[in-house]
Image (cartoon, rainbow, N blue to C red):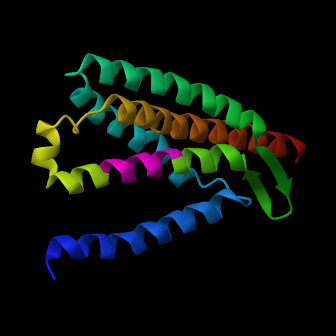
C-alpha cells in the first residue's frame, strides 16, 4: 500500500477525534482560561495576516476575506450576547451558544475537508495551485469568518471575566 493511500486512513480518525473533542467543549460550561483566550487573540489574527498576504494577489479572494472578517466580528458580538455567564462557588464559567459554535465548526471543517479532497484528487498542492485551488474566494470568506470570530469572542470573554472579577473584589 502506498504512503499516499495511507494518509486518509491515518488522518480521518485523528480529525474525527479532534471534531468530537471540540464538540464536547461546545456543549458544556467552560471556565475562562486566560492563557488560552489570549493565545486565540494572538494566533488567529497572525494566521489571518498570513492568509491575507496571499489573498491580496487575488482581488475577489481578498474582498471575501474582508467580508468574512466583518461577518465574523458581527457574529462574535451576537455570540457574546447569547452566551450564558455564571458565577458560582466553583468560580466563573460561561456556556457559549451551541448553534454558533457547532455551525462554525461544521462550516470550517466542511470547507477544509472539501479543499483537501480537491487538492488530494489533483495530485498535490502544486497541481492545486495551477488549477486555481490555492486561494479561493469561498475558502477565504469562511476563513475570515472563523479567524475573526474567535479572537473577538475571546476578547469579550476576557472583558467579562475582568469586569466580574472587579465586582467581586469591590464586594469584599
Residue furthest right as drawn:
171
In the picture, measured across the screen, residue 8 lies left or right of residue 149, that is: left
Above or below: residue 66 compared with residue 170: above
Q: Quadrant of residue 167?
A: top right
Q: Residue at x 39, y 70 (%)?
A: 12
Q: Position of residue 92 (x, y in %)?
A: 76, 54
Q: Position of residue 130 (x, y in %)?
A: 11, 37
Q: Residue at x 74, y 37 (%)?
A: 163
Residue 110 magenta-highlighted: yes
**Frontmost residue, 124 versus 93:** 124
**Frontmost residue, 156 versus 133:** 133
Magenta stretch, main secondary structure, is helix
Residue 74 magenta-highlighted: no
In the picture, measured across the screen, residue 68 lies left or right of residue 46, that is: right
Looking at the rendering, the stretch of residues picked out in magenta corresponds to 107-115
Above or below: residue 69 compared with residue 33: above
Count of picture labels: 0
**Frontmost residue, 106 versus 55:** 106
Above or below: residue 3 compared with residue 127: below
Q: Quadrant of residue 135?
A: top left
**Frontmost residue, 11 versus 22:** 11
Q: Position of residue 137 (x, y in %)?
A: 34, 28
Above or below: residue 59 compared with residue 154: above
Amino acid at each position: 500500500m502506498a504512503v499516499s493511500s495511507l494518509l486518509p486512513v491515518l488522518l480521518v480518525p485523528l480529525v474525527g477525534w479532534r471534531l468530537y473533542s471540540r464538540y464536547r467543549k461546545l456543549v458544556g460550561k467552560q471556565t475562562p482560561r486566560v492563557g488560552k483566550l489570549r493565545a486565540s487573540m494572538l494566533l488567529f489574527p497572525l494566521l489571518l495576516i498570513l492568509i491575507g498576504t496571499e489573498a491580496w494577489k487575488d482581488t475577489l479572494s481578498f474582498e471575501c476575506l474582508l467580508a468574512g472578517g466583518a461577518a465574523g466580528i458581527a457574529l462574535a458580538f451576537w455570540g457574546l450576547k447569547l452566551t450564558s455567564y455564571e458565577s458560582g462557588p466553583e468560580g466563573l464559567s460561561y456556556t457559549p451558544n451551541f448553534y454558533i459554535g457547532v455551525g462554525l465548526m461544521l462550516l470550517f471543517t466542511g470547507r477544509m475537508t472539501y479543499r483537501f479532497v480537491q487538492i488530494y484528487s489533483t495530485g498535490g498542492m502544486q497541481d492545486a495551485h495551477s488549477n486555481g485551488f490555492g486561494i479561493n474566494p469561498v475558502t477565504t470568506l469562511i476563513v475570515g469568518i472563523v479567524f475573526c470570530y474567535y479572537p473577538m469572542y475571546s476578547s469579550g470573554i476576557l472583558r467579562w471575566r475582568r469586569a466580574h472579577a472587579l465586582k467581586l473584589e469591590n464586594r469584599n
